[in-house]
């Protein structure tokens, strides 16, 4: 029973991670690298972009912990 709960949590956290990654705005940086515009050296994250960046890191750490727990439960 516990193994099934961990597997379901892994699926949910993975889907949330995919959504966070897809919502991040990277198109402007890619366009400037191909067409020579911009010239920005760094980018300050504000608002939703900052939330998505921090959320992605938290989701990846949570997924790593769930994978570790899953491996420990199997062995």
Image (cartoon, helix red, strand yellow):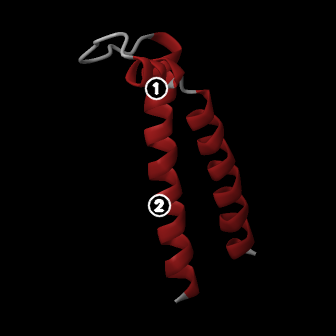
Give the mark nearer the N terminus: 2 vs 1: 1
Q: In this view, does 21 lie above or below 50?
A: below
Disc 2 on helix, strand or loop?
Answer: helix
Q: Where is residue 61 in the image (x, y as percent from the top left)?
A: 44, 51
Q: In the displayed orientation, state which residue is furthest to the front.
A: 35
Residue named by callout 2: 65
54 displayed left or right of 42: right
- Using a 10 Å C-alpha cutoff, classify the residue at mark 2 as few (fewer than 14 neighbours), some (14 to 19) or many (20 or more): few
- Quarter of the rendering containing residue 4: bottom right
Q: In this view, does 72 lie above or below 45?
A: below
Q: Residue at x 32, y 16 (%)?
A: 43
Q: Which residue is drawn at 61% across and 27% down?
A: 23
Q: Position of residue 69 (x, y in %)?
A: 51, 70
1 displayed left or right of 30: right
Q: Where is residue 50 in the image (x, y as percent from the top left)?
A: 44, 20
Say if mark 2 contacts mark 1, CB within 8 Å.
no
Q: Which mark is residue 75?
A: none
Residue named by callout 1: 30
Q: Which residue is drawn at 43% across and 40% down?
A: 57
User: Which quadrant, please, contains the N terminus?
Assistant: bottom right
- Quarter of the rendering containing residue 54: top left
Kindly report the distance in space between the C-alpha atoms of the residues bearing marks 2 and 1: 32 Å
From the viewer's side, name the closer residue of 49 and 74.
49
37 displayed left or right of 66: left
From the viewer's side, name the closer residue of 51 and 26.
26
């Amino acid at each position: 029973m516990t193994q099934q709960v961990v597997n379901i949590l892994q699926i949910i956290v993975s889907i949330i991670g995919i959504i966070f990654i897809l919502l991040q705005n990277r198109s402007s940086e890619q366009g400037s690298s191909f067409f020579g515009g911009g010239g920005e050296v760094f980018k300050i994250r504000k608002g939703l972009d900052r939330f998505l960046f921090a959320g992605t890191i938290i989701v990846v750490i949570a997924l790593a912990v769930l994978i570790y727990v899953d491996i420990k439960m199997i062995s």
